[in-house]
Image (spheres, rainbow, N blue to C red):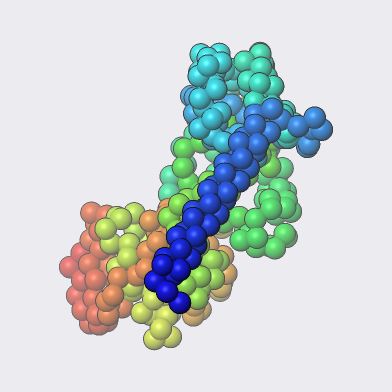
Amino acid sequence: MGKKKRKKIIKKAIRLTFCLILIILLGISIYYIIDISNDIRGTDIKGEEVTLEIISGDTASSVTEKLKELGLIKYEDIFKFLSRMESLERNIQIGTYVINEGSSYQEIFDLLKSNTTYRESIRITFTEGCEVQDIFNTLVANGIGNLDRYEQVAKGWDFGYDFLPEIGSENRLEGFLYPDTYDFFLDEKEESVIKRFLDNFNKKMTEAGLWEKISQKGETVYDTLILASIIEKESQYTPELARISSVFHNRLEKRMMLQSDATVNYILDKEDRYSSISSSTMAIDSPYNTYKYYGLTPTPICNPSIQSITAAIEPEDTNYLYFCAKGDGSHVFAFTYEEHLKNVKAYLG
């Protein structure tokens, strides 16, 4: 084959490829233009009703994010742009909205600007390491929900998350109600309140990439949360969480009992007794007594922070087997029991 003929073939192939690329790009552009247009205009046949809650402090931007998460809109940037033209930021109303799937952007704008319903809300902060019972008691004390109903929902409600223990499990939500600051409506239903905690837990885990890390380690989510809850209760001093985690990992590998004061305190708290470790610790016959039984406790003992969960997954590389509180919130660590006893004498007397 001559050079001229080869050149012609190559040029023809290039032109063909270029045309093909243009056709593909044009097709993609047309698809998105049509899809965006359909999303803006909505559909003639409306889908299921979806509840949107707008609370004090919500902005047009945060409302747009909620709409996207609920599947009511696809294109956040376009909705935000159009919302500025609609002056949504100035006219948005606090309240609960029932919006049909397939509603047009204009229908959503009109609804958000016209609602006059006001629901009183309250902001509550839950600290890391709080227990489910603490959370329920705090909510009820602030006028949100009924304690019996919370316990009923916690044990038997299907929240749609496969990371939760089976319905009916004891202490089913311990470890999964993420401690954070929340805004609640005073007339909010118990299942909606609990769902907020679970949604936040899932969001925090996803943002930190912890679902993937747990899977890569070959661990279970539940065991990870159990260990994280023990770490959380043992120390709130963030810089040493991974080191505390290493102690527990090392003890488990050596088939040593965890001997965590926090797990025993969990039992004593449940029994409304003074929470302190004493010479009678071994007499407490409970699977939560890690001085008496090997391994992890049956359930988490609190709701840990994302830092403690990370530490449970990624312990520091040490050979430590013991740690002792120094009295200032931090701990001193030891390799041997003899060193540990010296530390106990030095810091605890």
> Farthest right residue?
45
User: Residue at position x 53%, y 51% from top?
Assistant: 19
- Lateral position of residue 263 relative to residue 74, left or right: left
Q: Between 289 and 19, which is closer to the camera in this rendering?
A: 19
Percent x, y of residue 188 = 66, 32
Question: In this picture, is 95 found above or below 45?
Answer: above
Q: How many marks?
A: 0
Q: Is residue 36 visible?
A: yes
User: Residue at position x 23%, y 61% from top?
Assistant: 326
Percent x, y of residue 162 = 65, 60
- Lateral position of residue 80 relative to residue 157, left or right: left
Percent x, y of residue 314 = 37, 68
Q: Between 299 and 34, which is closer to the camera in this rendering?
A: 34
Image quarter where the N terminus lies is bottom left
Image quarter where the C terminus lies is bottom left
Q: Is residue 312 visible?
A: no
User: Residue at position x 42%, y 80% from top?
Assistant: 252
Percent x, y of residue 60 = 51, 24
The part of the image, by quadrant, that contains residue 116 is top right
